[in-house]
């Protein structure tokens, strides 16, 4: 009989073998805070226009070079449970407003760092949490007073460009004017009078080669495909869209055909050809001069399409097919049949062209009021193209946020310092122990302009004292001038650097919630991971120089 080893008394006694638990301030709270601090310091250096890029290689060995916090976190797959909460808060920010993910991380990290100081001083967790909640409530009350302007006309490209510019600048510093103008054109062209804007209607097509400044915008859609048949361009296109393969129909039931002579064989295949021809002819006679199919194109069908001068394009993705239907106003038909005039789509011109060395099919609308517009991005490397696409996404999301709430706040740390100033004075007037937490909440706002300054190579402390001095004189819109020498400050409203109100509103709310959730945890209990023992890795050949080398394919035993 095996020897029974008794477990240590206490909490571990109740759990299975292999379970771990941490409790109390030292083990749980400070551990969690440390993990969140590490995470926020990682993305802090990527904050602002001068933020550094991160090189992330994900589990599929795909390389990302970006300073977009949302992408970095998505590909990192953070495992620590407390750090995961902060990551979730930034994902919520991404879904809610589409920008400001790094703001959430830096701010939540600063809140937790300062909470650690308070806890080490001897405050209880509940006092810190209460102070943070009061301060957050106060911050959201003060925020509307910081508004410097509101968007007047979102149908004016020039005005929209000036609002989008800040969001694009943090991703693509140097190309922001050019890209912001492109994005503004794309957004305004599909922004209906009704005021309902859908982010999905601005498409991005990435084509390698040339430079960023060769990017352009098209009203309509661009697909990286080739036309199947001989016809490569159609003016005033009437489009029949099929979600099935462009091929002869296969019968539902199985049957056996008995053929006795060569003549019967000829007649059999002739019948199939006639049927195919009749179908293609019917499509042509319905008025269509172009066919888009969602499946493979049979050789015979292609032959008849060429005979009846039908342009053929094949789209593999059903999402692309749906979007195309939306663009041209067509209905995707489930089987090959002649479309009615209502089911056919219409487009000014469809043509095959070559951009760089990539063949693309362009569905172009001459009139401005089309449902979908496409930004064609050019760039020298795939990583650069991906990064510009993220900048475009941020710009389009900023436009969507402005449609919901037109208010704008001064950027570059101006709003944060104003909030810090007012919350500090609010903290002075609070009688209880929460006042320490409220003052620390105000101090946490300084982390953002400090990160901007340090990423630009400026001493953070000098800049913050300058900003406070300017704000005490009543200049609410004073922020960090990145292009100035040293810790320079200037009026952000005049410089045109503004953030949408909702980005800051949700950022403060989500970061505070995440920080409070992390602080509320006082015990971590981890069950033993599921699954059996891990399989040992195959060792290299005994005669290799090092164990890390690949094992040889030859057998050692002959």
Image (spheres, grey):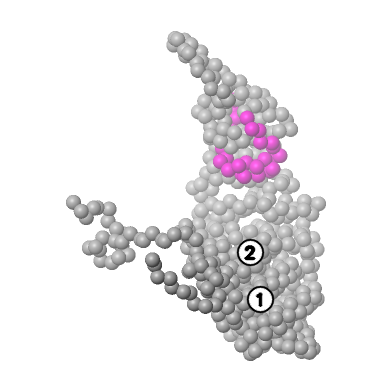
Residue behind mark 2: 91
* Whole-percent x, y for residue 462 in the image: 62, 87
Can the viewer see residue 179? Answer: no
- Residue in the image at 67% along x and 61% along y: 95
Give the residue at the far left of this rendering. Answer: 558
- Residue in the image at 63% along x and 90% along y: 121
Q: Nearer the viewer, mark 1 or mark 2?
A: 1
Query: Relative to 91, is 145 above or below?
Result: below
Q: CA distance from mark 1 to mark 2?
A: 21 Å
Q: Residues within 10 Å of mark 1 (few under 14, many from 20)?
A: few
* Whole-percent x, y for residue 243 in the image: 61, 36
Q: Nearer the viewer, residue 215 or 375?
A: 375
> Where, by quadrant of the figure, is residue 396 drawn?
bottom right
- Residue in the image at 74% along x and 72% along y: 409
Circle 1 SS class: helix
Q: Nearer the viewer, residue 450 or 190?
A: 450
Query: Relative to 186, is 495 above or below?
Result: below
Which labelled disc corresponds to residue 520?
Answer: 1
* Whole-percent x, y for residue 113 in the image: 61, 81
Mark 1 or mark 2: name the one nearer the start of the chain. Answer: 2
Please provide the residue range marked out in magenta.
308-335
Q: Quadrant of the N terminus?
A: bottom left
- Residue in the image at 72% along x and 68% along y: 506
Residues marked 1 and 2 touching at CB (< 8 Å): no
* Whole-percent x, y for residue 153 in the image: 79, 60
Position of 541 compared to 477: left or right?
left
Q: Nearer the viewer, residue 156 or 113?
A: 113
Residue 329 within the magenta-colored segment of the rendering = yes
Residue 311 within the magenta-colored segment of the rendering = yes
């Amino acid at each position: 009989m095996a020897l029974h080893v008794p477990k240590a008394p206490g909490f571990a006694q109740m759990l299975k073998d292999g379970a771990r638990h941490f409790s109390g301030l030292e083990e749980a709270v400070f551990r969690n805070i440390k993990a969140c601090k590490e995470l926020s310091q990682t993305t802090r250096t990527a904050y602002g226009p001068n933020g550094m890029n991160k090189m992330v290689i994900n589990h599929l060995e795909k390389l990302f070079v970006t300073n977009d916090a949302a992408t970095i976190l998505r590909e990192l797959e953070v495992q620590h449970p407390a750090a995961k909460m902060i990551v979730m808060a930034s994902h919520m920010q991404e879904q809610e407003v589409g920008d400001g993910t790094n703001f959430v991380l830096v701010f939540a990290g600063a809140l937790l760092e300062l909470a650690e100081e308070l806890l080490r001083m001897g405050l209880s967790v509940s006092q810190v949490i209460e102070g943070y909640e009061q301060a957050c409530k106060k911050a959201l009350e003060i925020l509307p007073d910081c508004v410097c302007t509101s968007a007047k006309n979102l149908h004016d490209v020039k005005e929209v460009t000036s609002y989008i510019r800040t969001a694009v600048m943090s991703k693509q510093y140097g190309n922001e004017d050019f890209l912001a103008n492109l994005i503004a054109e794309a957004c305004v062209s599909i922004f209906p009078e009704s005021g309902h804007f859908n982010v999905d209607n601005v498409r991005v097509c990435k084509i390698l080669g040339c430079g960023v400044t060769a990017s352009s915008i098209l009203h309509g859609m661009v697909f990286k495909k080739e036309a199947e048949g001989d016809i490569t361009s159609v003016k005033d296109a009437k489009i029949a869209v099929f979600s099935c393969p462009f091929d002869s129909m296969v019968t539902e039931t199985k049957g056996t055909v008995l053929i006795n002579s060569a003549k019967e064989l000829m007649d059999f295949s002739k019948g199939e050809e006639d049927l195919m021809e009749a179908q293609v002819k019917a499509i042509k006679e319905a008025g269509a001069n172009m066919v888009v199919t969602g499946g493979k194109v049979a050789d015979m069908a292609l032959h008849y399409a060429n005979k009846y001068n039908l342009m053929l394009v094949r789209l593999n993705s059903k999402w692309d097919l749906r979007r195309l239907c939306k663009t041209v106003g067509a209905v995707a038909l489930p089987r090959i049949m002649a479309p009615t005039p209502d089911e056919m789509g219409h487009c000014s011109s469809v043509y095959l062209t070559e951009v760089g060395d990539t063949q693309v099919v362009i569905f172009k609308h001459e009139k401005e009021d089309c449902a979908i517009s496409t930004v064609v991005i050019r760039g020298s490397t795939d990583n650069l193209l991906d990064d510009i696409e993220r900048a475009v996404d941020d710009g389009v999301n900023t436009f969507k946020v402005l449609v919901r709430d037109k208010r704008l706040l001064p950027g570059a740390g101006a709003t944060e310092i104003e909030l810090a100033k007012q919350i500090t004075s609010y903290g002075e007037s609070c009688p209880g122990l929460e006042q320490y937490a409220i003052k620390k909440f105000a101090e946490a706002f300084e982390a953002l302009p400090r990160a901007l300054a340090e990423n630009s190579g400026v001493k953070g402390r000098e800049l913050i004292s300058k900003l406070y001095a300017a704000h005490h004189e009543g200049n609410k819109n004073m922020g960090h001038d990145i292009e100035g020498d040293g810790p320079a400050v200037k009026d952000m409203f005049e410089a045109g650097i503004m953030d949408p109100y909702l980005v800051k509103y949700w950022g403060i709310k989500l970061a505070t919630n995440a920080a409070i959730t992390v602080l509320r945890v006082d015990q971590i209990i981890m069950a033993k991971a599921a699954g059996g023992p891990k399989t040992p890795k195959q060792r290299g050949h005994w005669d290799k120089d090092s164990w890390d080398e690949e094992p040889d394919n030859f057998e050692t035993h002959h």
